[in-house]
């Protein structure tokens, strides 16, 4: 895949500093003024049930300065100077500093964020090129449920990092090489009547051969059965592998067709999931074939790889196996062949040298942790992975069935990803239909199907992304498509309510005013204050995702925002209010809608205007 080597821009939009950031700076300056030898101490500012924000540094500082925590808190408050932000300061308990922000400071934040296309979020990742390896299905095999997590976690991370200014390079490391292609191509050659190309398949056909990749998987199973039972076919298949590796034109042509048809099936899944991966992002194992020998030679010349029992291996200096011997990477087999280890070594070298990565993320299951630890160690010893480049394995847990075990069909088979998505859309269709009928609305079947697909796919993605990625979670289509609770459907419904308010306002010729022109004109209600404070931490949620690579930080933020908006909606009439109050509430509704829509988009979830 051609990748531009133009250096990423180092310009960084400043964004709108969050109130918690501004208060942290002000309190840090107060600590320095009160206790110069404690300059740089963290004020420990956090949200609080007792105030807008609370500073808890006094307890830790008291031990260092030899004073009572309340006395330390009093000294810091005495030195605090932020009249433009703070309305009231109170010391409580052993030395907690409770801070109530002024309505004027809150409204200025709303004005600044509403007037910014980026909602005031700074581009904190500008100047950094991030290569993200995710999805990675196998050619000629259906995408299974275990591909779901890598695909949508990787896509969410790519979206967030891109939004924060990183130069993101997606990489879909397809499993497109190996001995299995020998038997598949040989079977196809001996059975020309087999239908597996898209042009050969009935578009309306149901069952396992409804797509090229499902047809190819069925052919592979037949080829495998013959391979195991017929020694002559096995020999012909092995010869076909040699032909493929040697570049035999006829064999390579069929292999290229298999890859193309499989990619077509993957693209259909990606489009349905709303994942941004394209064929241009595919960089399969085969793309590194031409450099495997060079990688092996470079490692051998550097003294990192050595001969052991006829094979070329890298023995770890950091990891030992169960036998207390160094863990090993197989660089070249004793028969001269190359495998998975060599390909991944070539891959990381390519991503550093040719793609210019500053950060490399491998969104791959937790069971591959040892493998990547060895790959990263070898890359460091080879001098490829320097202190200027960060390589991280981003592991994740499993999708479980209702029985708490790995999700499988009743027959014990692995669940196809397309079937899982169909189940979720069917569950969403039932919920949406029941909702429409309960409200006495006439059902438009085409519109209903579109809404159900958006809700079903959104439900699947949110159920995954709202959990810590390292934890397993249970797939429950009925629970995840509920309108209530921490679900994607709940967030999508919240967005439709916001859109509905703005739509009804437009019908009454009440346009959303320019926030910069809206005066506060009266005290904010408690529910308004709570909503403003939550809106103000959107950027913080995104920087947490970028730092710890946990999309559930953003999912949790959006759920909290939707709940706070619900409280606002119940307590603060918008269209029924008048004058300046209605003006500011329309601004709040619009800013909340934009923030929720942006956040959902960064998770790869649609934000419908109607449900």
Image: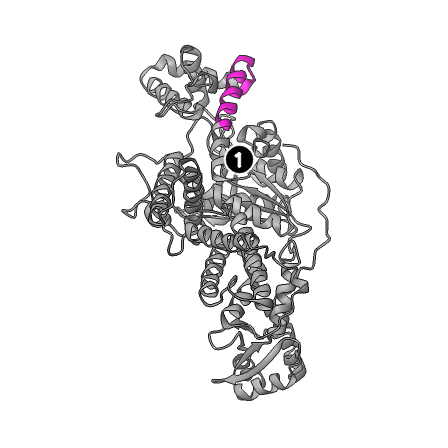
Apparent side of residue 213 relative to residue 164 in the rendered image (left or right) = left
Quadrant in which residue 414 is drawn = top left
Apparent side of residue 101 relative to residue 13 in the rendered image (left or right) = left
- The residue lying toward the viewer, choosing from 74 and 174, is 74
Residue 608's x, y, as percent?
A: 49, 46
Query: What sort of colour scheme is used for the picture?
Result: one colour
Quadrant (top left, top right, bottom left, bottom right) of the N terminus: top right
Chief SS of the magenta region: helix
Is residue 298 among what the camera can see?
yes
Q: Is residue 447 magenta?
A: no
Residue 20's x, y, as percent?
A: 59, 69
- The residue lying toward the viewer, choosing from 301 and 102, is 102
Q: How many marks?
A: 1
Quadrant in which residue 486 is drawn = bottom left
Magenta part of the protein: which range?
A: 245-264
Residue 372's x, y, as percent?
A: 50, 44
Q: Which residue is mark 1?
A: 173
């Amino acid at each position: 895949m051609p990748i531009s080597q133009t250096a990423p821009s180092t310009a960084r939009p400043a964004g709108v500093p969050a109130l918690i950031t501004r208060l942290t700076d002000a309190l840090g300056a107060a600590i320095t003024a009160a206790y110069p030898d404690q300059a740089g101490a963290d004020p420990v500012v956090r949200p609080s049930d007792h105030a807008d924000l609370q500073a808890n540094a006094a307890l830790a500082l008291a031990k260092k300065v030899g004073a009572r925590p309340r006395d330390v808190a009093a000294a810091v408050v005495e030195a605090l100077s932020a009249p433009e932000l703070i309305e009231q300061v109170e010391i409580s308990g052993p030395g907690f500093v409770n801070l109530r922000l002024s309505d004027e400071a809150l409204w200025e934040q709303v004005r600044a964020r509403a007037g910014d296309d980026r909602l005031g979020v700074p581009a904190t990742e500008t100047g950094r090129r991030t290569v993200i390896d995710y999805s990675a299905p196998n050619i000629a095999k259906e995408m299974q449920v275990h591909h779901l997590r890598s695909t949508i976690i990787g896509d969410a991370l790519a979206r967030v990092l891109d939004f924060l200014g990183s130069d993101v390079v997606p990489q879909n490391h397809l499993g497109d090489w190996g001995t299995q292609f020998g038997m598949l191509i040989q079977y196809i050659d001996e059975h020309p009547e087999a239908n597996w190309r898209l042009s050969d398949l009935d578009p309306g056909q149901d069952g396992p051969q409804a797509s090229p990749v499902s047809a190819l998987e069925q052919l592979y199973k037949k080829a495998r059965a013959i391979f195991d039972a017929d020694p002559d076919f096995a020999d012909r298949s092995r010869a076909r592998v040699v032909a493929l590796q040697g570049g035999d034109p006829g064999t390579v042509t069929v292999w290229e067709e298999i890859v193309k048809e499989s990619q077509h099936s993957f693209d259909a899944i990606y489009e349905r999931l709303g994942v941004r991966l394209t064929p241009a992002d595919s960089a399969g194992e085969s793309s590194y074939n031409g450099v495997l020998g060079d990688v092996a030679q470079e490692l051998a010349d550097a003294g990192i790889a050595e001969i052991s029992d006829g094979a070329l291996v890298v023995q770890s200096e950091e990891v030992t196996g169960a036998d207390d011997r160094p863990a090993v990477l197989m660089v070249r087999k004793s028969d001269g062949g190359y495998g998975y280890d060599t390909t991944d070594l070539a891959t990381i070298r390519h991503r550093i040298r040719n793609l210019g990565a500053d950060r490399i993320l491998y969104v791959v299951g937790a069971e591959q942790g040892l493998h990547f630890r060895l790959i990263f160690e070898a890359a460091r010893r080879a001098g490829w992975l320097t202190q200027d480049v960060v390589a991280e394995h981003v592991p994740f847990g499993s999708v479980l069935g209702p029985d708490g075990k790995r999700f499988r069909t009743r027959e014990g088979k692995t669940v196809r990803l397309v079937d899982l998505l169909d189940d979720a859309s069917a569950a969403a269709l039932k919920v949406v239909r029941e909702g429409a009928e309960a409200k006495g609305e006439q059902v438009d079947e085409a519109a209903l199907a579109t809404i159900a697909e958006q809700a079903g796919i959104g439900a699947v993605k949110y159920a995954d992304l709202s959990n810590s990625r390292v934890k397993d979670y249970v797939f429950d289509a009925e629970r995840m498509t509920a309108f209530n609770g921490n679900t994607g459907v709940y967030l999508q419904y919240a967005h439709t309510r916001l859109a509905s308010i703005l739509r009804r306002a437009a019908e009454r010729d009440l346009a959303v005013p320019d926030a910069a022109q809206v005066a506060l004109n009266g005290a904010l209600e408690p529910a308004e204050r709570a909503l403003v404070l939550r809106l103000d931490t959107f950027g913080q949620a995104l920087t947490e995702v970028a730092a710890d690579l946990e999309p559930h930080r953003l999912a949790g933020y959006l759920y909290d925002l939707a709940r706070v908006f619900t409280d606002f909606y119940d307590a603060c009439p918008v269209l029924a209010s008048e004058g300046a109050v209605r003006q500011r509430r329309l601004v709040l509704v619009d800013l909340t809608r934009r923030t929720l829509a942006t956040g959902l988009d960064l998770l790869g979830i649609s934000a419908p205007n109607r449900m």
